[in-house]
Amino acid sequence: MNGMTLELALKNELMTTVRLATGGVCSLAGLGLDDSEDCKVCVTESLLLLKHRGYLSAEIRYGYEDGFEISIEGKSVGGEKSSPAEDEISVALLNALAQNVTMEKRNGELCKVAFRFGTKA
């Protein structure tokens, strides 16, 4: 499978960089403009979900072959947790914009978000 992995600290100032990198990978995967924009939103919202669970860093795996798959996994815990009520909008956006959204839990807490976009053009 073709792809790329990016590991980063979950800091607000890095979100623009992640969005730019995601846009580049979307282009390589053959996604159109609308799907690329939706994918960037989904990656950002997934990172925010993990940050709200107290993760300090995350690993993003982009894979493209028969379709474009992204998985985002929290790596180091120790940050401040926030209210799960804030996450409802993020979850709704993910389910509305992406395909095959899955959310894995470890010890009752969200630790990984994965989703898919269309097929390679």
Image (cartoon, rainbow, N blue to C red):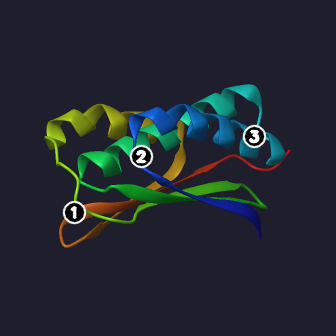
Disc number lying in front (2 or 1): 2
Q: Nearer the viewer, mark 1 or mark 3?
A: 3
Q: Residue at x 44, y 58 (%)?
A: 58
Placement of 79 over or under 104, stated as above or below:
above
Tell me which label, 3 or 2, sits earlier in the chain. 3
* In the foreground, 25 or 91: 25
What separation in Å lies between label 3 and label 2 (alpha carbons)? Answer: 18 Å
Residue, disc 3: 24
Considering depth in this image, is 39 or 95 the residue closer to the camera?
39
- Whichever of callouts 2 and 1 sits on the residue coming sooner in the sequence is 2
| Residue depicted at 40% across the width and 35% down the height | 12
Kindly identify which residue carries mark 1: 109
Residue 113, by quadrant, is bottom left
In the image, what residue type sits under mark 3?
Gly
Which of the 4 image quarters holds residue 4? Answer: bottom right
Q: Which mark is residue 47?
A: 2
What's under tag 2, amino acid-wise? Leu
Residue in the image at 73% along x and 62% along y:
3
As drawn, the label of residue 15 is none
Q: Amino acid at mark 1?
A: Glu
Residue 40 visible at all: yes
Residue 72 in sight in this render: no
Crowd rating for badge 1 (residues with CA inside 10 Å; few <14, some 14–19, many 20+) = few
Between the residue at mark 1 and the residue at mark 3, the CA separation in whole angstroms equals 31 Å
